[in-house]
Image (cartoon, grey):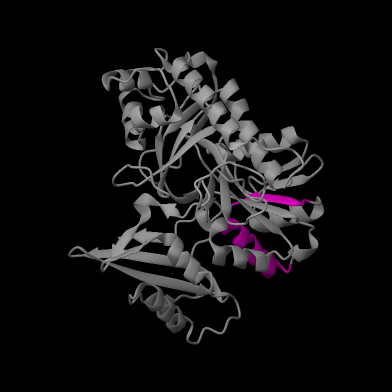
Amino acid sequence: MTDAPHPTRSELEALQLEQLRSLVAELFPANKFYASKLQSAGITFDVSSATDFSARFPFTTKAELVADQLAHPPFGTNLTYPLNRYTRFHQTSGTRGAPLRWLDTRESWEAMLDCWAEVFRAAGVKAGDRVMFAFSFGPFLGFWLAFEAAARLGALCLPGGGLGSAARLRVMQENGVNVLCCTPTYALRLAEVAAEEKIAIHTFGIRTIIVAGEPGGSIPATRAKLESLWPGVRFFDHHGMTEVGPVTFECPARPGVLHVIESSYYAEVIDPVTRQPASRGELVLTTLVRTGSPLLRYRTGDLVKCRRQNAEGRAEACECGRFDLALEGGILGRVDDMIIVRGVNIYPSAIEEIIRGFADVAEYRVQVSTTQALTELRVEIEPVAGAVTRELGARLELMFHKTFALRVPVSLVSAGTLPRFEMKATRWIRG
């Protein structure tokens, strides 16, 4: 529990309704994308309640946004103001289809900086801390927001762009860095390079590592491996999207639980097939403060499990004192990442949970093949240096069989064979 009081559930809901009404009023008729979309569906722009909003307003999908930008290049029509009011350009990675270009006004940018400041505050980052951003800055939104938000808090910010892993480690060591921001995969890679270079990362004084970009920060086995490689460090998970912004931060009191920043997002969870409300399903977000390039009921594709109420049906504060929506286990995976192997539903996070439970595995890759409508998995494993590899593959195969009742062949490859990743890891190869 922090000293500062957190908004009650009723206060959060009252704020969200006020923001929803203000947002919808601002979009009509200025935002051509939503004005056209809602008018063609016969939607009136009044919002009597959050329930009314969810019942009447349609979902927004990425496919719609991509089609809009293709039809109205380069930025599409989801812009509430004249183009000369926009000062920031970002772009999605395009790993799941065509990339989306996203623009922000100064006001929308400031609102998202407030969100990232909330992430930092939850992680205990404060003025005077020295924060290393271990990635090459590109068109992705999160890099720039995190850097500027940390600077605004009064932290000393060290950019790691253009440096190799060993050089980044030395910058951290020589400049007294105590907070690191990177992907979970890259935190593993930095520890691996430190061992190769005989750099004692346990002497750095790193207190906190904030991870994002992949679900690994909330996968128990991956988290345990990270904590073993970075002794004494507290890991904080976070997630967001370029088209949505910074959405969640890890609960300070409950590792592996993500809180949605509900003062900035109206969140829903739906069954991805029936589209009805569910406790486990797809996260749907409305951006309450990103008015310049908003999203209403955006289907994120993120699979989550939430708990809004206690057994008696009452809203209940988290152990940290917050009433913000709690996502148990963080981001569990992507709705469209699930594959069916001989009738068994498998998510990549479930495979990672098993593999990271083996200390002798340095890196892995999953090959997915489909022959005559039959999908099969094959896993490649790269052992850590000096590991005793005898029976490692057989033990992994046994664990896969126990978990999924499937035979998943495992092969070992030599050191340095599998790729390492600074950004989002691409471990699943479909062919």
Which residue is drawn at the image coordinates 33% and 75% (left, top)? 406
Quick check: is 193 in the magenta stretch? yes
Q: Note whether 265 is above or below 229 in the view shown.
A: above
Quick check: is 322 in the magenta stretch? no
Q: Nearer the viewer, residue 251 or 185?
A: 251
Q: Note whether 387 is above or below 226 in the view shown.
A: below
Q: Position of residue 276 (x, y in %)?
A: 33, 42
Q: Nearer the viewer, residue 402 or 422?
A: 402
- Classify residue 343 as left or right of residue 53: left
**Mainly helix, strand or loop, the magenta region?**
helix
Numbered label tally:
0
Q: Position of residue 178 (x, y in %)?
A: 77, 52
Furthest toward the left, the residue is 372
Q: Note whether 51 is above or below 41 in the view shown.
A: below
Task: Evaluate whether residue 263 shows in this view.
Answer: no
Which residue is drawn at the image coordinates 40% and 28% (left, top)? 53
Give the position of the C terminus as an image quadrant: bottom left
Q: Position of residue 384 (x, y in %)?
A: 57, 74
Q: Position of residue 91 (x, y in %)?
A: 47, 35
Which residue is drawn at the image coordinates 39% and 12% (left, top)? 29
Q: Nearer the viewer, residue 95 or 56?
A: 56
The segment highlighted magenta reads 177-198
Task: Evaluate whether residue 266 shows in this view.
Answer: yes
Furthest toward the front, the residue is 312
Q: Nearer the viewer, residue 96 or 12?
A: 12
- Classify residue 387 as left or right of residue 93: right
- Classify residue 197 as left or right of residue 40: right
Furthest toward the bottom, the residue is 390
